[in-house]
Amino acid sequence: MFNKRIYLITENTNFKKDFDFIRQIRRASISISSNIAEGFERNTDKEFVYFLYVAKASAGEVRSQLYLAFDLDYITKEEFEKLLESVTEISKLLSGFIKYLSKG
């Protein structure tokens, strides 16, 4: 759902001319879910935790890019706040999962 929202928001006309930025924010967004999936398939908690950290870093990258998109008036304040809330929640969930898996 988050990735879809990033894709839809980057389709708006404000983004249209900034191809590099569109590719970067989309790539970072996809990296979150892709790294979770790849880590899960590794079948060890240690490797899974590593990939969760990579996913969390990608969430931080998306968060930074959302601030830039807002500063450049590519997205509205409402869009920014909703997406920022979502990616912040994703990051918190990843932190909790990392903490849980690291205890074992």
Image (spheres, grey):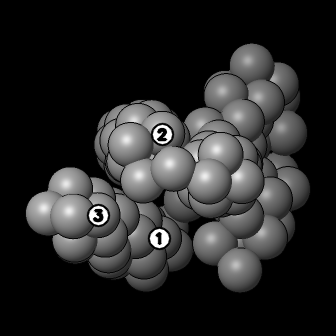
Which residue is under mark 2?
Answer: 47
How far apart in space, not on screen, are marks 2 and 1 (Cα)? 28 Å
> How many numbered circles are shown?
3
* Residue at x 71%, y 80% (from the top left corner): 1
Amino acid type at circle 2 is Glu
Which residue is under mark 3?
Answer: 101
Mark 3–mark 1 CB contact (< 8 Å): no
How far apart in space, not on screen, are marks 2 and 3 (Cα)? 10 Å
Residue 93 is labelled as none
Q: Secondary structure at mark 1?
A: helix
Dot placed on the residue nearer the N-terminal end, 2 or 1: 2
* Residue at x 40%, y 70% (from the top left corner): 90
Q: Secondary structure at mark 2?
A: helix
Name the spot of residue 47 as percent of width and height, x first.
48, 39
The foreground one among 18 and 5 is 5
Amino acid type at circle 3 is Leu
Name the spot of residue 94 as percent of width and height, x first.
34, 64
Q: Is residue 28 left or right of residue 90?
A: right
Which residue is under mark 1?
Answer: 83
Amino acid type at circle 1 is Leu
